[in-house]
Image: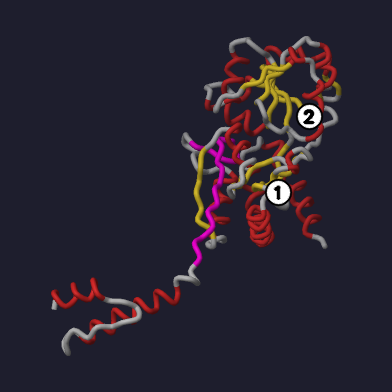
Amino acid sequence: MKTGLSKLKRQFSPLHTRVLSQRGRGVCVYVAFILLMGSMSSPMAQPKEALVWLLRDLPPLMIFEGPKKGQGVIDQLLPLLIAGMPQYTHTLMRVNRARGLQMLHEPSLTCDAALNRSKERERWIVFSIPVFRAMSNGLAVRRVDRESLAPFVQDGEVDLAALLASGSEKLGIIAERNYGDYLDGLLKQAPPNALTAHYGNDALGSLLQMQRLGRLRVVLGYRPEIRYQAEQQGIAVDELQFYPIRGAEKFLSGYIGCTDTPQGRQAIVEINQLLRKLPRDRLSEAYAAWLDPESRRAYLEESRVYFEQQAQP
């Protein structure tokens, strides 16, 4: 029997079936049937499109390490998207901001689930409908240094344009981050020596340490992200004072962005279909859990109203 099967493997052709013996005829016919079916189905079987998801350590959206690893807002969303898109082979890739933006310029199908949208980025990234709402960026200063901002504070908000123009303080920022159209416009107009840009993988944590050491006094960032990173750096949250920025949007939308190619545009169509079916309250609650109690209620109400308006035809 083994000899017959060996000959069959060597001699079988889809067009010619050699009958080895009465005993081996059933095996031969079975193998012929399997190979025939394989040859018929192989042209129809298409390999799955590869989709690369870019992951960046961006609390409270994505968290790579520590006791809250994997508990970020996007950490909870991404498995739902992947499960709803079985037509793709999904790959998760950890990158820093610079590498992530570079990959979104490349022709391969690549998506980032936590992006701000801007006119500049729309030239080479195709965006989803809004995914979540986030509180806008503000200025963090140590309480012992808050008098340095006093000349620029009005009704609890900082006039960032005046602060930058004065040259009295260096502002710590994350290099290549999009802070929203209004703030990005102010940063582009700032004198070169008014900004301290950090490019590292743990850019915000490094800026907070520089602030702690007195190398700069003012840091720009999202309030919940600053709170989280301060705790990771051993900085008590009550050591910091946070100020909104005068004229800036109080809330921003977060989007999924994919490479602006036919494949990327098709992926966004499918992602939008899934997003419309997801309960928005779940993502809003996940984000609100990272806010201080005084901000949580206002955020949840704003998020509810915003997405109700987005759902209207």
- Find residue 50 and report its horizontal and vertical position in percent: 53, 54
Q: Quadrant of residue 246?
A: top right
Q: How is the image coloured?
A: secondary structure
Q: Secondary structure at mark 2?
A: helix
User: Does residue 312 show up?
Assistant: yes
Q: Is residue 85 left or right of residue 294?
A: left
- Find residue 58 and report its horizontal and vertical position in percent: 59, 36
The question of residue 62 being in magenta is answered with yes
Q: Secondary structure at mark 1?
A: strand
The question of residue 26 being in magenta is answered with no
> Residue at point 67% right, 51% down?
261
In the orientation shown, which residue stands out farthest toward the bottom?
Answer: 22
Q: Quadrant of residue 287?
A: top right
Q: Amino acid at mark 1?
A: Val
Closest to the observer: 131 or 125? 125
Quick one: quadrant of the N terminus?
bottom left
Q: Residues within 10 Å of mark 2 (few under 14, many from 20)?
A: many
Q: Is residue 5 left or right of residue 47?
A: left
> Residue at point 57% right, 17% down?
209
Dots 1, 2 in contact, CB < 8 A: no
Which residue is labeled 1 in the image? Answer: 126
Vertical comparison of 60 with 243: above or below: below
